[in-house]
Image: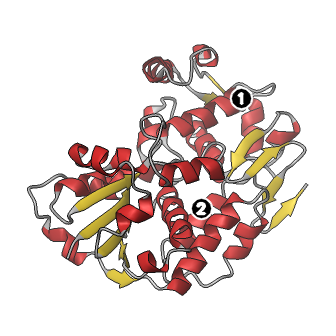
């Protein structure tokens, strides 16, 4: 029986462990910016043509020699070459969104759905250390059959996340998602990143203020120690963007962030890193008041960010209370 593993970028080491005939990683990032359009997703899962490298599913096959041979296949046609398809996605919210997006794509292909099996990965795939194949630990990861009703429920979360308001995602918490036990907590984590009543900041932004207020002046702790940060929604680069939003508005909540970050291009990661490492952060008096819920950050600073398909601005503002309300 030929087996295919579909996983996130977190699980790329699975390809080295001899667990399947092929391993394909999904490299979409669905947090921290606008979602890809439906046209972009169709091109990604369709037949390869003139896309840039990385914009077609076949670009992420582990075996490079296989890519040219299958580039003229759609993603579904490639899946048809296998008898079993295992889904390996860890608790990371972006991983769970990738899983939901895949299941939405599979929803109209019952022959593919019939092959799907879900590994209940209760740990972060990036913590797996490369070992000689085969990796014995895979047998301890529970495996469950994916049913059409399960696909419908999970793909509904993806459609809700794409909506122009977060109401459908809030409603999705009331649905039966028990077949995907990591999806509900991931969705709740995402909802908590909406601006909170009383501060106007999401959960990660408030945690950053707490840590800086406690005396953590350097950015390394804020970027890399996810367990210490206690929030795992955003990537390192996205944490940097949050810090810039807190520091570079008309009324900053933090000071000491290197001012050169205002001018460094987004793709210049080396200079970004150097500037963050030079920074020595502290709270402004305004930041202390925001942290104490005495003032609202958004009353003094412009808001322009994306939460799924919701474009949050000062004129299109949604708060998490933890009940959801528009303003």
Circle 1 Cα neighbour tier, 10 Å, few/some/many (<14 / 14–19 / ≥20): some
**Residue 146 image position (x, y, % from top left):** 43, 82
**Does residue 66 sit above or below 147 in this rendering?**
above
Question: Which of these two is toward me, 274 or 221?
Answer: 274
Pair 1/2: label in front: 2
Mark number displayed over residue 189: 2
Question: Which of these two is toward me, 310 or 156?
Answer: 156
**Does residue 260 sit above or below 134 in this rendering?**
above
**Residue 161 picture quarter:** bottom right
**Does residue 192 sit above or below 151 in this rendering?**
above
Mark number displayed over residue 179: none
Q: Is residue 9 shown left or right of residue 268?
A: left
Would you name the residue on which mark 1 appears? Answer: 284
Report how far apart the C-alphas of labels 1 and 2 lie in the structure.
27 Å
Circle 2 Cα neighbour tier, 10 Å, few/some/many (<14 / 14–19 / ≥20): some
N-terminal-most mark, 1 or 2: 2
């Amino acid at each position: 029986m030929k087996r295919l593993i579909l996983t996130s970028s977190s699980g790329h080491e699975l390809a080295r462990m001899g667990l399947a005939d092929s391993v394909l990683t999904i490299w979409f990032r669905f947090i921290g910016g606008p979602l890809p359009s439906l046209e972009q997703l169709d091109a990604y899962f369709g037949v390869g043509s003139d896309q840039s490298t990385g914009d077609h599913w076949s670009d992420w096959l582990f075996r490079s020699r296989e890519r040219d041979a299958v580039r003229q296949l759609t993603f579904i046609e490639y899946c048809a070459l296998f008898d079993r398809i295992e889904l390996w996605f860890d608790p990371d919210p972006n991983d769970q969104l990738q899983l939901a997006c895949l299941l939405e794509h599979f929803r109209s292909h019952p022959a593919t759905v019939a092959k799907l099996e879900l590994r209940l990965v209760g740990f972060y795939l990036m913590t797996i250390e490369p070992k000689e194949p085969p990796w014995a630990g895979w047998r301890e990861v529970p495996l469950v059959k994916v049913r059409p009703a399960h696909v419908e429920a999970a793909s509904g979360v993806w459609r809700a996340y794409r909506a122009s308001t977060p109401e459908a995602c809030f409603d999705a918490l009331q649905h039966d998602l028990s077949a995907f036990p990591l999806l509900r907590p991931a969705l709740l984590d995402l909802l908590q990143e909406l601006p909170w009543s009383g501060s106007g900041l999401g959960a990660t932004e408030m945690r950053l203020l707490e840590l800086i207020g406690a005396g953590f002046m350097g950015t390394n702790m804020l970027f890399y120690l996810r367990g210490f940060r206690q929030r795992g929604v955003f990537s390192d680069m996205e944490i940097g963007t949050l810090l810039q939003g807190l520091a570079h508005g008309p009324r900053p909540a933090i000071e000491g962030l290197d001012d050169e970050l205002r001018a460094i291009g987004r793709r210049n990661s080396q200079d970004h890193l150097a500037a963050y490492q030079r920074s020595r952060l502290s709270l402004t008096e305004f930041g202390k008041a925001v942290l104490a819920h005495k003032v609202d950050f958004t009353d003094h600073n412009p808001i322009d960010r994306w939460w799924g398909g919701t474009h949050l601005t000062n004129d299109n503002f949604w708060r998490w209370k933890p009940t959801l309300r528009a303003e």
